[in-house]
Image (cartoon, helix red, strand yellow):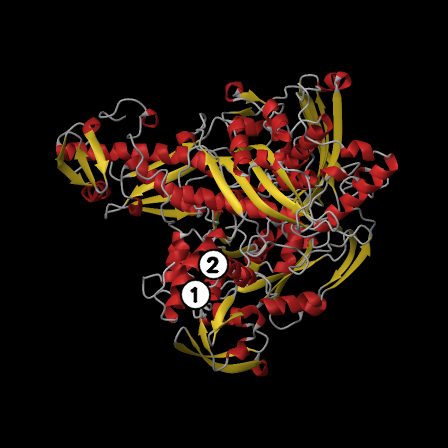
C-alpha cells in the first residue's frame, strides 16, 4: 500500500505498539487483525451496535467509527486488559454471577462501556444504567443480567471512588 | 459382554438424588468469553489467507445478460473471480435439509444463474489479498442486468397476474400446499351458533445474531482435506451439505464451529457463501475467509416469520369452541433455504384448546425477496398471534371474559396425551394452572373489576392474555422420514477418560450462547457422580465428535440428555469394572463420589478415578478380559417431541387519541419440565421474550411494492430492542415433567418468542374495547394502533353501532 500507510505508536492495555497501518483501516480492524487482540468484536461497522466499544484515553468509543490512524499517541484499553492474570475482575465476575452473557459476542462491548462508567460521582439508577448501556446491542440475554451486573458493579465502584461508606 | 453387570446399561437407574441437575451452576463458557478469548471465525487468521467479497443483485428480479470481469481481474491483489457459469460447472445446488412435503427442488446454486430472484442474491464473488481490495474489485465488475417484473406480496404472488419466478420448475409461485385435518370442521361450522373469521398478517423479521455469518475454508489437495471454520449451529449438517454441493466425500471435509455469536435458526445449514469460499479455496490452495457485513446480512442471511393466516373458529353460545380451521400462507422468498419457511404453525394451530374437529392448510408462496429460513419459534409465534387474538374476539362477541373462554376450552391434564390434527401428541401439562398463575400475577380480576375510565394521563389500561403450547424437539426419525427431512432426531456424545481423572465430553453441538457446554457437563457429572469441574466439554468439531444432528428446534437437551445419560452409564460401568478388580468387590456395590470410587458399604475402601483412568489408558492393571481405554459413545433418539406450555399476561396503557402505548407489565408463566440449570432457563426465556417483543412492537423488514426494494435493510431502519426499550418482565415457572424425555426435560430455547405479540395486542384491544378496535397485523406500533382506532371509529359511525359498543364488553354471559 506504500504511501497509503501511516505509522502510529500507542499503548494497548499498557503495552507499547508501533505499526504501519493503511489509512483507511478502522481501529477495530487494526486492534483485531494487526495487534491480535481479537476480543473486541465487530457487529455492524456503522456505529450502531456498539459491540466494538473500547476505551481510548479513558472514554468509551465505538472503534469501528475511528480510524487506526486516530489512535496515534493514545492509551487504549480492550477487554483483554480487564482480568489480572487468571483472575477475572469484579465486573467480569458480576457478569458471570448474573448470567449477563450468552453467546458472548457483544460482551466485550458492554464490559468496556460499563468500565468507563465506574468513576461517576454517584452510582447510576437502574433506569440510568438502561439508558447508558443502550448504545450496545445484545440479542441473546434480553439485557436483564447485564443491567443487574452493571448495578452491582457500579454501586461498588462509584461509591468506593467517592469514599462513601454507605451501603444499600 | 460384561460379566459384572446384568442388563442394558441404559436401563439401569442412575444414582438417586441429583447433585448437579437443577442447580444454577456458573457457565463453562463464561471465562473465555469474558476475557475476550472466544474463538469466533473472524478471530482466526491463517497464514497466506485471502479474503472474499460477494457482488449482489440490486434488483428484486433480473435477467443477467452479461458479466464482464476483465477490469477487476487485472487489479493488483485480486486473485480469483467466480461467476454463475463457473459455479454451475464446479458445484451442485444447495440441498434443503427440511423439504416442504410434495415440493419440487429449486436449483439453488451458490451464484445466480441466468436470473436473480431477490435483491441481495449473490451474482459474483471475488477473492483478493484483502477484503477492501475484493470489494473494490466488485465495483469494477460490469453486470448487464435486465430488470424483470417482480412481486413481493405474499398473497399477490399467488394470483394469475404475478410474474412466474421459477418457470422451469413450477407453473405458479405456489411451491406446495399441505393439509392436516381431523374430524368434520366444515360440517360443524355450517351448523355452529357462532363462526368468527379473521385474517392476520405477521411481519417479516430477522434473527439478527450479533455475529453475522462467517466462513474460513482451507483446502489441502494432497491430503484431500477441506477444513472449514464456520459460524454455524449445525456443523455436521453443513459438512453433509458441503459434500453434496462440492462433490466431495464427507470424509474429506472437517467443519469446526468454535464460538458462534448467536444463531437463532439463522445459522441452520449451508449458505451460498459457504460454497463459494470453499470453491475459491480449492481453486487457489489458499485459505479463503468471508465475513458477512451487516448490510449484506439484511439481504443475504435468511429472514424469518412472514405469513398470512386466515382463521375460522366455530363455537357454541356458551363459549365452547367446536371447530377450528386455519388456511395460512408462508412467504418463502426467492429460494427454498436449508430450512425454508416455517412449518410448525400446522402442529400447534389449535393451541392449548380441546378442539378435535380442526383443519390446517399450509401454502408456501415464492416471492422476490430474501429466502426465509428457520427463526426461533418457526411458525409458533405466528400462529399464536392469530389464534389468541381471535380467541379474544370470540370472547368479546359472546360477551364472555377472555380468561373464562380460555379456561373453559383448555385441555385438562387428564385429556393428555392429546393428538392434534398433524398427528403430533401433546405429552403432558397443566395448561389451566399456567393461565391462573399468569392472571393472578397481573391482578387480572382487579383490572376487570375497575371502572373502564381513562387515567389522569388520559390513558386507558387494558390487560391481555396469551396461552400457548409449544412443540420442542422432534419425535423419532420415523416421524422425520415421513416429512422427507435430511437429518435424524438423535443426539450423541463421546466421553473419554484422562490420566488426571478428568473426563472429556465431545459433542457436535456447537456453542452459540445456549449454554449447552454447561448443561451437558451438569448432566454428565450428575449421572457419573464426579465433580462438575472435572468435565471438559469439546464442542462443534466434526472431526472430534460423534455424528449428530445439531442445536435447533429446542431439541438439543431433549435428545442430548438421553445420549449423555446413556454414555455416562456405559462409562460408569467400565469404570466400576476396573475398580471392582482393584477393590476385589462387585461392581454392583460401587459408587463414584467425586474423584474416588468407593464401596457403598465401606467408604474407606476406595480407589481414585485418576488411578482407574490411568490403568485403563495404559492397559495395565485392568482385568485380563478387558480391552484398554476408557471411552463411551452413545446415541439417543427421543420417541416423541415434548410440548412445553404456558401463558403470558400483559398490562398496557394506551393513549386513545394518539395510539401511543406502554407495556407496563409483562408476566410469563412457562413450563419446560425438569430445569437442568434454572439460570440458563431464565436466560433463554428472557432473551427470546425480548426478541418476541421486538418482533411484536417494531421490527419489520419491509419491501416496497413498486420497486421491490428492501426499505428497512440497515441498522438505522431496523429496530432491534436496546436495554432502554424493554418493558419490565416477570418470569414464573411451573414444572410438570415430560413423560417422554430423559429426566422429564422439555426444550426452552424458543418459547419466549411465542406469546408476546398476542398478549400485548389483546391488552390494547381490551384497553380500547369501547372503540371496538381490532388488531390483525404486526408489528404493533403506535401508528398501527392509531390506524386501528381510526378504522374502528369510522366503521362504528358508518354502521351506526354506537349503542352496541357502549354495552359493557366481557360481562359474563348469563349462564
| Helix, strand or loop status at disc 2 | helix
| Helix, strand or loop status at disc 1 | helix
Q: Is residue B348 above or below residue B716?
A: above
Residue occupied by mark 2: A107
Quadrant hosting residue B372: top right
Of marks 1 and 2, which one's residue comes earlier in the chain? 1
Residue B343 shows in this picture: no
Q: Is residue B19 above or below residue B691?
A: above
Residue occupied by mark 1: A79
Q: Is residue B538 left or right of residue B137?
A: left
Query: What distance separates the C-alpha of mark 1 from that of mark 2?
Result: 9 Å
User: Which of these two is toward me, B644 or B669?
Assistant: B669
Instruction: Please tell me how crowded label 1 is: few (under 14), some (14-19), or many (20+) other residues with Cα within 10 Å.
Output: many
User: Which image quarter holds the C terminus of chain B?
Assistant: top right
User: Which image quarter holds the N terminus of chain B?
Assistant: top left
User: Which of these two is toward me, B663 or B653?
Assistant: B653
- The chain letter under disc 2 is A
Quadrant hosting residue B623: top left
Q: Is residue B200 above or below residue B315?
A: below
User: Which of these two is toward me, B810 or B663?
Assistant: B810
Task: Give the label on residue A141, or none.
Answer: none
Amino acid at each position: 500500500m506504500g504511501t497509503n500507510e501511516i505509522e502510529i505508536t500507542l499503548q494497548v492495555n499498557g503495552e507499547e505498539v508501533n505499526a504501519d497501518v493503511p489509512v483507511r483501516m478502522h481501529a477495530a480492524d487494526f486492534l483485531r487483525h494487526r495487534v491480535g487482540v481479537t476480543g473486541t468484536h465487530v457487529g455492524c461497522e456503522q456505529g450502531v451496535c456498539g459491540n466494538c466499544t473500547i476505551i481510548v484515553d479513558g472514554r468509551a468509543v465505538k472503534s469501528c467509527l475511528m480510524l487506526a490512524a486516530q489512535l496515534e499517541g493514545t492509551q487504549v484499553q480492550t477487554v483483554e486488559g480487564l482480568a489480572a492474570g487468571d483472575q477475572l475482575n469484579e465486573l467480569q465476575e458480576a457478569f458471570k454471577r448474573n448470567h449477563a452473557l450468552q453467546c458472548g459476542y457483544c460482551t466485550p462491548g458492554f464490559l468496556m462501556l460499563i468500565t468507563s462508567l465506574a468513576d461517576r460521582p454517584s452510582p447510576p439508577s437502574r433506569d440510568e444504567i438502561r439508558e447508558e448501556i443502550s448504545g450496545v446491542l445484545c440479542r441473546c440475554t434480553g439485557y436483564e443480567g447485564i443491567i443487574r451486573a452493571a448495578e452491582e458493579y457500579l454501586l461498588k465502584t462509584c461509591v468506593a471512588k467517592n469514599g462513601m461508606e454507605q451501603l444499600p | 459382554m460384561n460379566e459384572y453387570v446384568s442388563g442394558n446399561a441404559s436401563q439401569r437407574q442412575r444414582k438417586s438424588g441429583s447433585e448437579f441437575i437443577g442447580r444454577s451452576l456458573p457457565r463453562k463458557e463464561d471465562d473465555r468469553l469474558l476475557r475476550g478469548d472466544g474463538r469466533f471465525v473472524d478471530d482466526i487468521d491463517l497464514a497466506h489467507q485471502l479474503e472474499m467479497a460477494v457482488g449482489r443483485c440490486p434488483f428484486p428480479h433480473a435477467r443477467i445478460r452479461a458479466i464482464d470481469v476483465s477490469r477487476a481481474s487485472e487489479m493488483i491483489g485480486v486473485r480469483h473471480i467466480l461467476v454463475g457459469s463457473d459455479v454451475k460447472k464446479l458445484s451442485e445446488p444447495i440441498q434443503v435439509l427440511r423439504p416442504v412435503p410434495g415440493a419440487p427442488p429449486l436449483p439453488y446454486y451458490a451464484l445466480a444463474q441466468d436470473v436473480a430472484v431477490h435483491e441481495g442474491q449473490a451474482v459474483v464473488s471475488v477473492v483478493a489479498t484483502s477484503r477492501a481490495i475484493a470489494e473494490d474489485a466488485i465495483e469494477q465488475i460490469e453486470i448487464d442486468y435486465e430488470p424483470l417484473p417482480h412481486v413481493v406480496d405474499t398473497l399477490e404472488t399467488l394470483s394469475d397476474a404475478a410474474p412466474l419466478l421459477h418457470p422451469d420448475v413450477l407453473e405458479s409461485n405456489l411451491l406446495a400446499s399441505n393439509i392436516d385435518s381431523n374430524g368434520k370442521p366444515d360440517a360443524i361450522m355450517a351448523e355452529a351458533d357462532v363462526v368468527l373469521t379473521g385474517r392476520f398478517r405477521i411481519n417479516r423479521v430477522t434473527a439478527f445474531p450479533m455475529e453475522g455469518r462467517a466462513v474460513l475454508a482451507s483446502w489441502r489437495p494432497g491430503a484431500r482435506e477441506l477444513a472449514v471454520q464456520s459460524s454455524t449451529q449445525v456443523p455436521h449438517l453443513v459438512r453433509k451439505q458441503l459434500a453434496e454441493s462440492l462433490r466431495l466425500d464427507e470424509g474429506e471435509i472437517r467443519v469446526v464451529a468454535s464460538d458462534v455469536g448467536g444463531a437463532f435458526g439463522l445459522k441452520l445449514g449451508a449458505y451460498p457463501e459457504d460454497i463459494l469460499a470453499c470453491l475459491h479455496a480449492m481453486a487457489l490452495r489458499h485459505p479463503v475467509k468471508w465475513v458477512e457485513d451487516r448490510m449484506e446480512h439484511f439481504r443475504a442471511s435468511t429472514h424469518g416469520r412472514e405469513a398470512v393466516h386466515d382463521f375460522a373458529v366455530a363455537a357454541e353460545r356458551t363459549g365452547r369452541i367446536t371447530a377450528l380451521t386455519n388456511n395460512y400462507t408462508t412467504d418463502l422468498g426467492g429460494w427454498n433455504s436449508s430450512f425454508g419457511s416455517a412449518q410448525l404453525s400446522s402442529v400447534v394451530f389449535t393451541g392449548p384448546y380441546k378442539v378435535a374437529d380442526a383443519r390446517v392448510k399450509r401454502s408456501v408462496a415464492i416471492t422476490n425477496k430474501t429466502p426465509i429460513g428457520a427463526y426461533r419459534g418457526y411458525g409458533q409465534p405466528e400462529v399464536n398471534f392469530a389464534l389468541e387474538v381471535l380467541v379474544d374476539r370470540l370472547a368479546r362477541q359472546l360477551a364472555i371474559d377472555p380468561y373464562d373462554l380460555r379456561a373453559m376450552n383448555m385441555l385438562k391434564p387428564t385429556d393428555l396425551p392429546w393428538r392434534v390434527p398433524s398427528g403430533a401428541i401433546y405429552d403432558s401439562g397443566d395448561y389451566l394452572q399456567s393461565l391462573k398463575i399468569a392472571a393472578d400475577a397481573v391482578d387480572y380480576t382487579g383490572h376487570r373489576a375497575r371502572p373502564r375510565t381513562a387515567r389522569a394521563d388520559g390513558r386507558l389500561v387494558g390487560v391481555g392474555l396469551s396461552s400457548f403450547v409449544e412443540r420442542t424437539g422432534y419425535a423419532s426419525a420415523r416421524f422425520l422420514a415421513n416429512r422427507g427431512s435430511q437429518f435424524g432426531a438423535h443426539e450423541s456424545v463421546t466421553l473419554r477418560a484422562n490420566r488426571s481423572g478428568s473426563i472429556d465430553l465431545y459433542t457436535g453441538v456447537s456453542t452459540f450462547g445456549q449454554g449447552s457446554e454447561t448443561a451437558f457437563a451438569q448432566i454428565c457429572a450428575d449421572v457419573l457422580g464426579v465433580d462438575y469441574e472435572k468435565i471438559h466439554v469439546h464442542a462443534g468439531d466434526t472431526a472430534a465428535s460423534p455424528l449428530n444432528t445439531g442445536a435447533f428446534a429446542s431439541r438439543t437437551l431433549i435428545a442430548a440428555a438421553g445420549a449423555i445419560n446413556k454414555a455416562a452409564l456405559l462409562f460408569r460401568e467400565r469404570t466400576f469394572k476396573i475398580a471392582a478388580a482393584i477393590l476385589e468387590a462387585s461392581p454392583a456395590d460401587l459408587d463414584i463420589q467425586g474423584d474416588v470410587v468407593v464401596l457403598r458399604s465401606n467408604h474407606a475402601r476406595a480407589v481414585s478415578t485418576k488411578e482407574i483412568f490411568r490403568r485403563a489408558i495404559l492397559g495395565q492393571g485392568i482385568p485380563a478380559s478387558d480391552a484398554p481405554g476408557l471411552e463411551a459413545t452413545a446415541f439417543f433418539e427421543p420417541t416423541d417431541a415434548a410440548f412445553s406450555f404456558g401463558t403470558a399476561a400483559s398490562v398496557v396503557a394506551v393513549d386513545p387519541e394518539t395510539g401511543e402505548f406502554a407495556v407496563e407489565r409483562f408476566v410469563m408463566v412457562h413450563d419446560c419440565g425438569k430445569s437442568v440449570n434454572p439460570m440458563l432457563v431464565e436466560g433463554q426465556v428472557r432473551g427470546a421474550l425480548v426478541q418476541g417483543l421486538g418482533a411484536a412492537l417494531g421490527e419489520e423488514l419491509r419491501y416496497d411494492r413498486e420497486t421491490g426494494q428492501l426499505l428497512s435493510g440497515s441498522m438505522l431502519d431496523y429496530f432491534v430492542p436496546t436495554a432502554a426499550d424493554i418493558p419490565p418482565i416477570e418470569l414464573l415457572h411451573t414444572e410438570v415433567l415430560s413423560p417422554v424425555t430423559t429426566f422429564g426435560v422439555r426444550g426452552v430455547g424458543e418459547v419466549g418468542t411465542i406469546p408476546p405479540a398476542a398478549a400485548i395486542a389483546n391488552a390494547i384491544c381490551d384497553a380500547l374495547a369501547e372503540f371496538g378496535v381490532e388488531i390483525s397485523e404486526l408489528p404493533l406500533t403506535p401508528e398501527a394502533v392509531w390506524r386501528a382506532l381510526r378504522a374502528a371509529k369510522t366503521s362504528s359511525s358508518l354502521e351506526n353501532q354506537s349503542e352496541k359498543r357502549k354495552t359493557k364488553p366481557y360481562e359474563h354471559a348469563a349462564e
